[in-house]
Image (tube, rainbow, N blue to C red):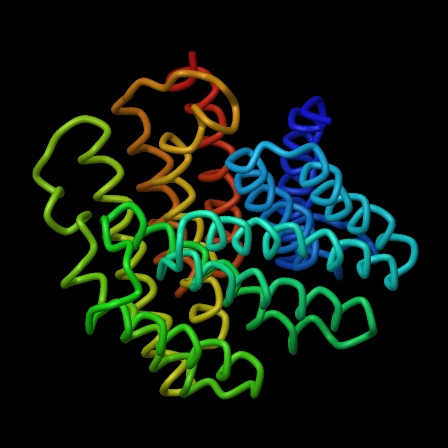
Amino acid sequence: MFRLKPLLMVFALTFLLLALYTGLAKSSLLHAGNLANLHSPFMMVGFFGTLISLERAVALRKGWVYALTALIPVGCALGVLLRIAFLLSAIGGLAMLFIFATFIRRYSLKVHWVIMAIGAASFVIATALYALGTPHERVYPLWLSFLVLTIIGERIELSGHFSTGGIWNAFALLNSTLLLLGATLQRAELLGLSLLSFVLWAVFKDVAFRNLRIGGMTGYVSSAIVLGYVWMSVSAILWTLGINYDLALHGLSLGFVFGMVFAHAPLIAPAVLERRVRFSPLLYAPLLLLHTSLVVRVFFLKPGALLGVLSVLLFLSVMRLKVLH
């Protein structure tokens, strides 16, 4: 069963490339026919759903978890032909909930696992709703909640706040519920408020803000994380005010989520890929290109979208050629 791990990585990267291609098609830079409508499912289910579930499966190291996780990309692939097949992806997403339940049963209740479990539930619900015909515009906030809560849970874990006690951890749990409520009810003001509240938590409790002056990999990771929170703030304000939906959406999905991917990839690569990592200053190039693409996108949609795709491809190249060894 552990041989599924490299196959799942291939699936995840394939769906990432498909998502980038269809993203360019949605920006009228390429032609993808009806596949362009699958940009969101390719990214949220095929790529992020598979990758995050795989990361959790590596931690538990159980064959059945890998097998259940494999339903996520299989359902996404079959969903190209038959939308109801995304129900397989939703069932595969249950692997994440089983993993967090196992951790809590074994090691006690910890705040970051609870928050990530709420995120996993968002993924399952959103993917099931999409499979049953709900327009992706209505389920997209739930998919975003999955990513935001997964990242926030990881930041709490890496910042060392493990217990469920304490006012800041209670604040994070309450805010996670508020985010899920806003996504479920399609209330932009609740989404904006919860995102701003997470930024407030981060300023006081995320170690990235204290590590900005450190050089090497730590400095790079901290810079990427802080820039991600900046875009979360921008998206939160735009959502709250109900203006510039495109920038609000991509500020969160690209600026925050992919910014955090750029930050965390060197940290999780040793466990997922079983490869050592080393710092390269070239990591800053795709990071700067990513954030530049969002600024350009404010004024010129097509060039901004193209730069965003190039930043992800450049990051993959730098990781492969300069960081992994």
Task: Residue 24: tell me if it is visible.
Answer: no
In percent of width and height, residue 76 lies at 78, 50
Q: Nearer the viewer, residue 25 or 190?
A: 190
In this picture, residue 60 sits left or right of residue 74: left
**Which residue appears at 31% of the width and 42% of the height?**
288
In the rendered view of the protein, which quadrant contains the C terminus? top left
Q: Nearer the viewer, residue 324 or 310?
A: 324
Foreground residue among 18 and 4: 4
Expressed as whole percent of the image width and height from the top left, the position of residue 174 reads 35, 78
Q: Is residue 324 above or below residue 107?
A: above
Task: Locate residue 99 relative to residue 45 in the image: left or right.
Answer: left
For the N terminus, the image quarter is: top right
**Residue that sits furthest to the top in the current view:** 325
Point out the residue furthest to the right here. Answer: 81
Residue 84 x/y as whole percent: 88, 63
Q: Position of residue 67 (x, y in %)?
A: 75, 38
Q: Is residue 16 above or below residue 200?
A: above
Q: Is residue 39 above or below residue 263?
A: below
Q: Residue at x 80, y 58 (%)?
A: 86
